[in-house]
Image (cartoon, grey):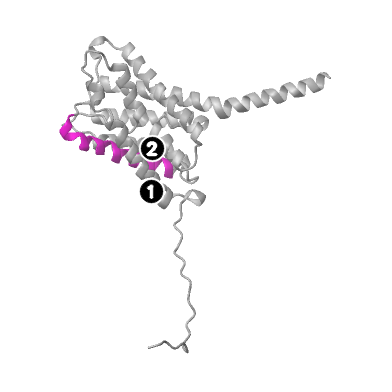
Amino acid sequence: MSESNGIIMEEEKITNISIFESKVRPILAEFIGSIILTSIVCAGAINTLSSGLNNGVIYGLTMVFLIIAFGDMSGGYFNPVITLGYTLARVLSIPQAVCYFFAQIIGGIVGAALVRASYPESEFGGSWLYGSLWKDILLEAMLSEAIPTLILVLTVLITTLDKKKRRLSPLAIGFSIIVCSVTSYSERRREFTFMNPALSFGPAVAYSTPYDGGELWKYHYVYWVGPLVGTLVASLLYRFVFALGSRRIRIPKPCFKKQPFNSGEKYAA
């Protein structure tokens, strides 16, 4: 009797561990990773005084070590648009993607709030991260988010879903972030390139005040629409052009039925 009870308890223990590892731990990994990413990038943006090169290097290298640390647990996304890209590539299920989305968004808010609590009040405000957006350059700002996001998501999908390239995927992703951040930084706008809605939404929530006139939210949609468009284009390119095996969508060739030719057929005049 004791042996059977021990077996039952062991099976329940294994089942509980399996549920935790497959369902709970990945969401926690995305949540903690998003906190770390947002807090480091926000603190780096404050300390480097909106330097495009420094911000890009900090952002990219942070993603490298986070992917290495948490990649085996959750995939190491920490970005809603990367989550969307994997969902469109049929890697993530929709329920799992929804859980990742909320974990990343809430993690971004917590990370930005930690930075705000760690720095003096004189550092509060979003100008160090958001730069200056005005109506005349909204299209430019949106493209500066869409194009780098396209490059990032395409790099993520190609390198992580190909077994031959998977080992170097953290470096490829990190370098793509560095290159895109540096090249898309505009001195005229002094705007940080996020390529990550969680990374833009978190500071907007944490740093907005009743006295800022809503400046952080006035054009905030740019940091959602731009990455969303870039992700959709990247996902289509991957599924139709670069995907391997069953993930690739193949356009069937048109089938024309050959009609038999009857040389003896006579036509009425």
Percent across and percent down for residue 32 are 45, 22
The vertical placement of 68 against 264, above or below, is: above
Closer to the chain start, of discs 2 and 1, is 2
Question: In which image quadrant can residue 139 be found?
Answer: top left
* Residue bearing mark 1: 237
Q: CA distance from mark 2 to mark 1?
A: 18 Å
Residue at (51% x, 50% y) in the render: 246
Q: Which mark, residue 173?
A: 2
Q: Is residue 38 a member of the stretch shown in magenta?
A: no
Outermost right residue: 1
Which stretch appears magenta? 134-158
Question: Who is closer to the viewer here, 263 or 179?
Answer: 263
Percent across and percent down for residue 221 are 28, 30
The number of discs equals 2
The vertical placement of 19 against 144, above or below, is: above
For this view, does 19 lie left or right of residue 236?
Answer: right
For this view, does 157 lie left or right of residue 217?
Answer: right
Q: At label 1, which amino acid type do we have?
A: Leu
Question: Who is closer to the viewer here, 147 or 185?
Answer: 147
Percent across and percent down for residue 123 are 24, 14
Quadrant of image for the C terminus: bottom left
Q: At label 2, which amino acid type do we have?
A: Ile
Q: Is residue 150 a member of the stretch shown in magenta?
A: yes
